[in-house]
Amino acid sequence: MAFFSPRRRAFPVHGYGCAPEIRGVYVGSLTSAQIARILPDDSSAQYSSAGYVVFSRSDRLMSQRFDAKRLRLSGDPVPIAEKRGGGLQRRQR
């Protein structure tokens, strides 16, 4: 995961290849010792400057609101594209 939150105060940490209860996407803070698991997925994730984390789940590209101050996601994940025939197709709204 290659993202930093606004003002570059949060950074990514991965738990690849670990036990399922540990595996996932984590974020840490540069201003405290806080590290939080934000996704259980073995996925690469990107921070969007619009305030969302974008990640893959079950052949779908998902987005979910990210609270950079509290280092946590809010709301439900929303599919924005899905894999069809070897490529990603954008979902119609």
Image (cartoon, grey):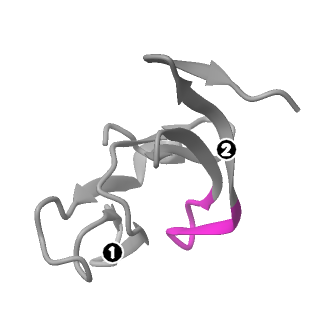
Q: Left or right? Give the position of 83 relative to 91.
A: left
Task: Tell me if residue 50 is in the magenta stretch.
Answer: no
Q: Secondary structure at mark 2?
A: strand
Foreground pick, 57 / 36: 57
Measured along the vertical axis of the image, is residue 64 above or below residue 55? below
Residue drawn at x 65%, y 46% is 51
Indicate the amino acid at tag 2.
Pro
Other residues around mark 2 within 10 Å, as few (<14) / some (14–19) / many (≥20): some
Corner quadrant of residue 38: bottom left
Query: Which is nearer the N-term, disc 2 or disc 1?
Result: 1
Q: Which residue is mark 2?
A: 79
Whole-percent x, y for residue 31 in the image = 35, 67
Whole-percent x, y for residue 67 in the image = 62, 63
Q: Check the image and name the residue furthest to the bottom.
A: 21
Q: Left or right? Give the position of 18 relative to 22.
A: left
Q: Left or right? Give the position of 10 relative to 23.
A: right
Foreground pick, 88 / 21: 88
Q: Main secondary structure of the magenta part?
A: strand
- Residue stretch rendered in magenta on the structure: 66-76
Mark carried by residue 32? 1
Q: Check the image and name the residue furthest to the right.
A: 93
Measured along the vertical axis of the image, is residue 64 above or below residue 19? above
Q: Secondary structure at mark 1?
A: loop
Whole-percent x, y for residue 17 in the image = 11, 62
Other residues around mark 1 within 10 Å, as few (<14) / some (14–19) / many (≥20): few
Residue drawn at x 83%, y 27% is 92
Residue drawn at x 62%, y 20% is 89
Whole-percent x, y for residue 20 in the image = 23, 77
